[in-house]
Amino acid sequence: MCGRYTLTDPGEELMRQFHLPGLPPEYLPRYNIAPSQPVPVIAAVEGERRIGMMRWGLVPGWAKDASIGHRMINARAETVAEKPAFRTALRRRRCLIPADGFYEWQVRNGRKQPVRFVGATERVFAFAGLWESWRPPTSAESAGEPGDAQPTRLVTCTIITTEANDFVRPVHDRMPVILPREAYDLWLDPSVQDPEAILPLLTSAPELRVYDVSKLVNSPANDVPACVEPLAEEE
């Protein structure tokens, strides 16, 4: 799975690599991104790439309660085309979730040591993601009068995972799908709705490197540069 990641870039590399005209005003470098938090997401809107903030943890349009998003932070590549929560989004609402690293925990001598995976060559990359728009259901009794404020729309996303490659497997058997740059346009193209045309992109190909980090990352409350610094050997 992918349950914590980073995007520490101040924004210049992000805009350059993804050909973005700007960033959301809420954008900040992040060192310990956790589920249920707002995250920057790139999608195709009227033929152009747009970036906005979405809540991490997908809430399907048919959901009765937004709490289902806590269980939908990841979608498995092997079943994403069949699962009711994800199959429509796979066809119509694919996105890129920019990142520059992700965390896992390796058991050593009975203790969990957090590690950070980063690209061997790419400073910023993109997870394959899906997004959804959801509004709370309203009953006839609670619908109110015409002109009343409508329930707030919630825009959410999920990260697709696949089997770990050789770089991640010693630590965990799953990893986020990291798309190559040449796949971005196809992945974002809403006119491509045949799963057979896009499922081959969901592999675990990129070279990565890994290093130990501080146990600060164990708590989502810690979102500071020290989270991504290599752990000194004496620690």
Image: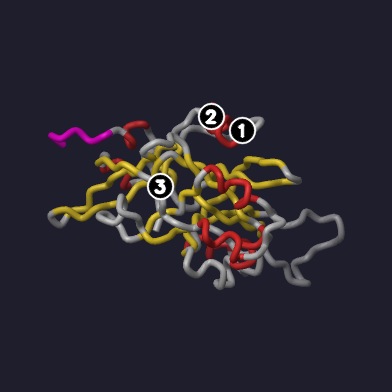
- 231 in magenta: yes
Q: Secondary structure at mark 1?
A: loop
Q: Residue at x 54, y 62 (%)?
A: 199
Disc with the residue nearer the chain's start (2 vs 3): 2
Question: Which of these two is toward me, 144 or 174?
Answer: 174
Residue 109 x/y as whole percent: 12, 54
Q: Which residues are magenta?
A: 230-235
Q: Secondary structure at mark 3?
A: loop
Disc with the residue nearer the chain's start (1 vs 3): 1
- Which residue is denoted by mark 2 in the rendering? 11
Label 1: how many residues lie within 10 Å, few (<14), some (14-19) or many (20+)? some
- Which residue is denoted by mark 3 in the rendering? 206
Split into 4 quadrants, where in the image is the C terminus? top left
Q: CA distance from mark 2 to mark 3?
A: 23 Å
Please identify the quarter of the rendering in which residue 182 is found: top right
Tell me if 152 is positioned left or right of 201 in this view: right
- Residue depth check, mark 2 versus mark 3: number of the one nearer the observer: 3
- Which residue is denoted by mark 1 in the rendering? 23
Label 2: how many residues lie within 10 Å, few (<14), some (14-19) or many (20+)? some
Tell me if 124 is positioned left or right of 185 in this view: left
Disc with the residue nearer the chain's start (1 vs 2): 2
